[in-house]
């Protein structure tokens, strides 16, 4: 494994997502909201094939990723549709187009074409390996600041990290940790930028796929600042970084093309892959999405 890659040990964070096989009050509420958006589901609290089909159809007409999963993005657009329905005095409108910063099905089809892999393979990786949302609630790109990477990047830039390990161990350290979580990671990032601006940007993972800033040169961005500017543009830019990341690693690319999920997960996630069963989750997601797509990669 090359040095540029070996610093990654990625564990994605996922929000609550409803999917086929789930049951209960949350599913019942989802079915009611889908019916309010124009579907005719039996409200039984069982997330079966008909509910999944309705979710996929709603996602397609809303410009979202068409994965059949009812996560925060789908729920948010359903909420918008319900609010608009109320505002229109009972006349059901089509849902508004999704936020243009959000990932859509066409984006995943583009990525599949770039990587020469099945669309279902990209959808499986997006489902399991992404955060689910590339932005925090305040509109800033999702990040996680890594203090042990900061120590390495300072050294890379010719700066002795030792004084900062002593004075700011939550920002510069020889071991991972010190996380504030969520939007509070920006407080750590901004303090780290006062030590050394570019090292700080390079020491955070960014966006939907949480790719570390120090990869900027290998992925052919102009600078760390340019990479971060791109991460502010939207989830399509996050996907572009992911595509570059895969293209630069022959093991990842070959594994994805042949759906060798254990090999892919070992490379992408590091030691956490087996404990978290990412390989099995991607294999299952691939089969589910493959059956939801026709040979051309469009919705069946």
Image: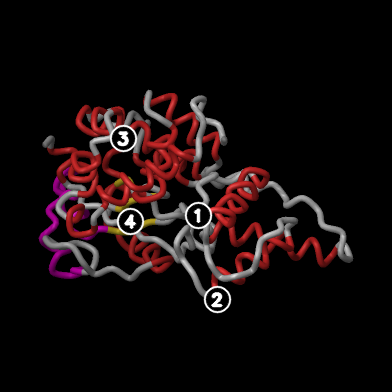
Q: Residue at x 71, y 58 (%)?
A: 40
Mark 3 / mark 4, whichever is N-terminal: 4
Q: Which residue is mark 2?
A: 25
Judge left or right: residue 194 versus residue 97: left
Quadrant for the N terminus, please: top left
- CB atoms of marks 3 and 4 within 8 Å: no
**Residue 205 rendering spot, x and y as whole percentages:** 32, 51
- CB atoms of marks 2 and 3 within 8 Å: no
Q: Quadrant of residue 171?
A: bottom left
Q: CA distance from mark 2 to mark 4?
A: 26 Å
Mark 3 / mark 1, whichever is N-terminal: 1
Label 2 packing within 10 angstroms: few (<14), some (14-19), many (20+): few
**Which residue is nearer to you in this view: 138 or 41?**
41
**Residue 37 rendering spot, x and y as whole percentages:** 73, 58
Mark 1 / mark 4, whichever is N-terminal: 4
Q: Which residue is mark 3?
A: 245
Q: Secondary structure at mark 3?
A: helix
Q: Residue at x 31, y 32 (%)?
A: 219
Residue 182 higher or lower than 65, as above or below:
below
Q: Which residue is mark 4?
A: 12
């Amino acid at each position: 494994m090359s040095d540029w890659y070996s610093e990654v040990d990625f564990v994605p964070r996922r929000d609550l997502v409803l999917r086929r096989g789930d049951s209960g009050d949350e599913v019942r509420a989802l079915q009611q909201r889908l019916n309010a958006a124009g579907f005719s589901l039996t409200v039984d609290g069982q997330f079966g094939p008909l509910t999944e089909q309705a979710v996929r159809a709603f996602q397609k007409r809303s410009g979202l990723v068409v994965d059949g999963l009812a996560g925060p993005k789908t729920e948010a657009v359903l909420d918008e549709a319900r609010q608009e329905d109320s505002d229109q005095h009972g006349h059901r409108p089509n849902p508004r187009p999704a936020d243009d910063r959000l990932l859509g099905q066409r984006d995943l089809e583009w990525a599949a074409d770039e990587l020469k892999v099945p669309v279902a393979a990209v959808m499986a990786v997006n489902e399991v390996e992404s955060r689910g949302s590339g932005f925090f609630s305040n509109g800033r790109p999702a990040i996680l600041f890594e203090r042990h990477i900061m120590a390495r990047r300072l050294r890379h830039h010719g700066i002795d990290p030792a004084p900062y390990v002593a004075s700011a161990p939550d920002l510069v350290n020889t071991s991972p940790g010190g996380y504030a979580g969520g939007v509070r990671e920006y407080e750590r990032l901004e303090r780290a930028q006062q030590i050394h601006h570019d090292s700080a940007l390079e020491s955070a993972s960014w966006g939907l796929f949480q790719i570390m800033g120090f990869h900027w040169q290998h992925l052919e961005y102009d600078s760390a600042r340019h990479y971060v500017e791109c991460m502010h543009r939207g989830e399509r830019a996050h996907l572009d970084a992911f595509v570059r990341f895969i293209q630069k690693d022959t093991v990842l690319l070959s594994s994805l093309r042949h759906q060798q999920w254990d090999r892919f997960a070992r490379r992408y996630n590091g030691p956490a892959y087996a404990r978290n069963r990412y390989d099995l989750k991607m294999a299952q997601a691939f089969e589910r999405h493959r059956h939801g797509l026709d040979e051309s990669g469009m919705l069946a």
